[in-house]
Image (cartoon, helix red, strand yellow):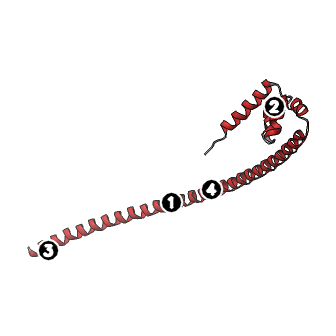
Amino acid sequence: MKKIFIVSILIVSFNSFLFAEEHIIDKQKKIIKKEEELKKEEERLTILSKEIDEKIRKYNEILNKIEKINTEIQDTYNKMEKIRNENVSHLVKIYEAMPPESAAKKIAQFDDETASMIIIKMKPKVVSNIFAHLDPVKSASITNFLIKIEKKIPTK
């Protein structure tokens, strides 16, 4: 009987061992499958990362081109503004040298913006003499234009 008991225990133990071994093999298969899935996901993410890096590089190139163009535009604008200011300064000298009556007749023909650009750079005494010969409506219009410009410029 002892032999049967030992044989029974051996059979049960062997079956348990086989079951445990099958369970371990199943777990190992699942782990291998998970590792393969993780490897595929890692490869997919690596590809995506490379695509993102390439897009960032392209966007940075575009941004650099835009910044370069913006700088060129700003430089061109500054040059044009400098030339415009030089031209206005030259015109100011011409109108300041004219008799006030002649300067008033010519300035009366300008739009308010142009007249203001010239008048704002003139000496106050010259402007007052020109305004004395300008039509009151035109004087008021130029004055209003200058005040509107002043209101648009932020002060500290």
Residue at mark 2 to residue at mark 3: CA–CA distance = 129 Å
* Disc 3, SS: helix
> In the visual, does 62 lie left or right of 107?
left
Q: Residues at badges 2 and 1 in contact (C-beta under 8 Å)?
A: no
Residue 113: image quadrant is top right
Q: Residues at badges 2 and 3 in contact (C-beta under 8 Å)?
A: no
Q: Is residue 105 visible?
A: yes
> In the visual, does 7 lie left or right of 103?
left
Residue at mark 1 to residue at mark 3: CA–CA distance = 50 Å
Q: Earlier in the sequence, mark 4 or mark 1?
A: 1
User: 95 or 63: which is nearer to us?
Assistant: 95
Q: Position of residue 121 (x, y in %)?
A: 80, 42
Mark identifier at residue 40: 1
* Disc 2, SS: helix
In the rendered structure, which amino acid carries the disc numbered 1? Lys
Residue linked to disc 4: 56
In the rendered structure, which amino acid carries the disc numbered 2? Phe
Compared with 17, 81 (above or below) is: above
Residue linked to disc 2: 131
Residue at mark 4 to residue at mark 2: CA–CA distance = 61 Å
Residue linked to disc 3: 6
Residue at mark 4 to residue at mark 3: CA–CA distance = 72 Å
